Image: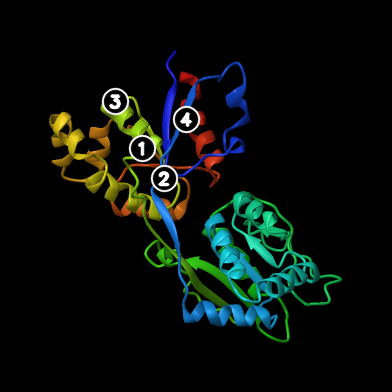
């Protein structure tokens, strides 16, 4: 029985991303994961960032919301580059000790990244109304919530904000959300106005297409598999990775030598009319989207896909195994 080969638009996959049962006797050696890097994060330094850091120094913000592990990394790198870095970090940690779960993470990976920076974080999971809110014994008059359903997507952040907005408070709740400049392009930017919230979405970084294709072992492996039509599954992990993937395929995937050596196959790929046809020619039979916003980007391109029920890499892999488990 041959292995299942799946590519994931992610620079690396951690061991705990892989479903545990993949290592059982039944599933051993059945999944071969190729983690292809598609984007690079580039820090931005702007007047808005300068102002937000000043506000952190003044203990202005009540909450910090993070929509990705990248945003956590860039946020703390930016802070650590400040002259008063130690003082600012101390204030951040102290605020985290005073207000329970004032750092909110979109999912487990983002939460883990915050914990690496000595921050206790809550998850912005979606949950039924009135079931998970506890404002008793809360001197700060801010909402404290309990985790419930699993929905690690921007929907859960919106849900969190909606409930936070209903909190009875004498003044507006001030929130900083460090973001990627891609948020607008990915339809992730929150444009809603809130009655009781002052939400600042500040662009701390931007993304660019990964460009070291020739040096990347994973991209070399990817090319080998698609040439031999042995890569039937592809998981997209973000809207920006969808955009970057197709730019890479169109412009940077092949070296001059490869174009000469495999000119017949490359001609077939380069002459396609649309991106769905391109995927078909690459031999990719099933696309899995990690979540709603990634699905929107695929939909724009008329690409057939299925969406993971749980919006994590592990959830997407579980989704694949659930669909095709009987063939493993």
Coloration mode: rainbow
Q: Which numbered disc, 1 or 3, marks the residue that appears first in the sequence?
A: 1
Instruction: Using the image, determine if residue 287 lies above or below residue 4.
Output: below
Task: Name the residue that disc number 2 marks.
Answer: 37
Mark 2 surroundings within 10 Å by alpha-carbon count, few (fewer than 14), some (14 through 19), many (20 or more):
many
Q: Residue at the far right: name it.
A: 137
Of labels 4 and 1, earlier in sequence is 1
In the displayed structure, does residue 260 sit left or right of residue 305? left
Quadrant of image for the N terminus = top left
Q: Which residue carries the number 1 mark? A: 219
User: Of marks 3 and 4, which one's residue comes earlier in the chain?
Assistant: 3
Provide the residue designation for mark 3: 229
Q: Is mark 1 on a helix, strand or loop?
A: helix
* Disc 3 element: loop
Residue 202 is situated, as x and y percent measured from the top left of the image, at 51, 73
Task: Read off the residue under disc 4.
Answer: 323
């Amino acid at each position: 029985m041959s292995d299942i080969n799946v590519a994931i638009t992610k620079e690396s996959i951690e061991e705990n991303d892989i479903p545990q049962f993949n290592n059982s006797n039944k599933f051993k050696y059945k999944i071969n994961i190729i983690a292809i890097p598609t984007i690079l994060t580039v820090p931005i330094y702007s007047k808005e960032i300068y102002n937000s850091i000043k506000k952190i120094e003044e203990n202005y913000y009540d909450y910090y919301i993070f929509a990705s592990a990248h945003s956590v990394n860039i946020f703390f790198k930016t802070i650590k580059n400040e002259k008063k870095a130690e003082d600012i970090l101390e204030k951040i940690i102290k605020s985290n000790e005073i207000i329970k779960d004032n750092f909110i993470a979109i999912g487990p990976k983002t939460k883990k990244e915050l914990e690496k920076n000595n921050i206790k974080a809550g998850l912005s999971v979606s949950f039924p109304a009135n079931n998970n809110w506890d404002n008793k014994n809360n001197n700060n008059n801010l909402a404290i919530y309990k985790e419930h359903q699993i929905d690690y997507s921007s929907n859960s952040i919106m849900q969190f904000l909606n409930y936070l907005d209903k909190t009875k408070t004498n003044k507006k709740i001030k929130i900083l959300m460090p973001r990627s400049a891609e948020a607008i392009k990915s339809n992730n930017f929150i444009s809603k106005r809130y009655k009781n919230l002052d939400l600042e979405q500040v662009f701390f970084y931007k993304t660019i297409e990964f460009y070291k294709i020739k040096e990347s072992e994973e991209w070399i492996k990817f090319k080998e598999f698609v040439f031999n039509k042995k890569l039937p599954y592809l998981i997209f992990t973000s809207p920006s990775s969808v955009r970057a993937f197709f730019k890479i395929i169109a412009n940077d995937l092949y070296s001059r030598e490869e174009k000469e050596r495999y000119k017949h196959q490359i001609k077939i790929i380069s002459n396609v009319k649309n991106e769905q046809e391109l995927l078909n020619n690459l031999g990719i039979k099933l696309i899995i989207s990690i979540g709603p916003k990634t699905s929107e980007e695929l939909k724009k391109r008329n690409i057939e896909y299925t969406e993971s029920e749980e919006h994590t890499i592990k959830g997407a892999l579980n989704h694949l195994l659930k669909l095709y488990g009987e063939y493993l």
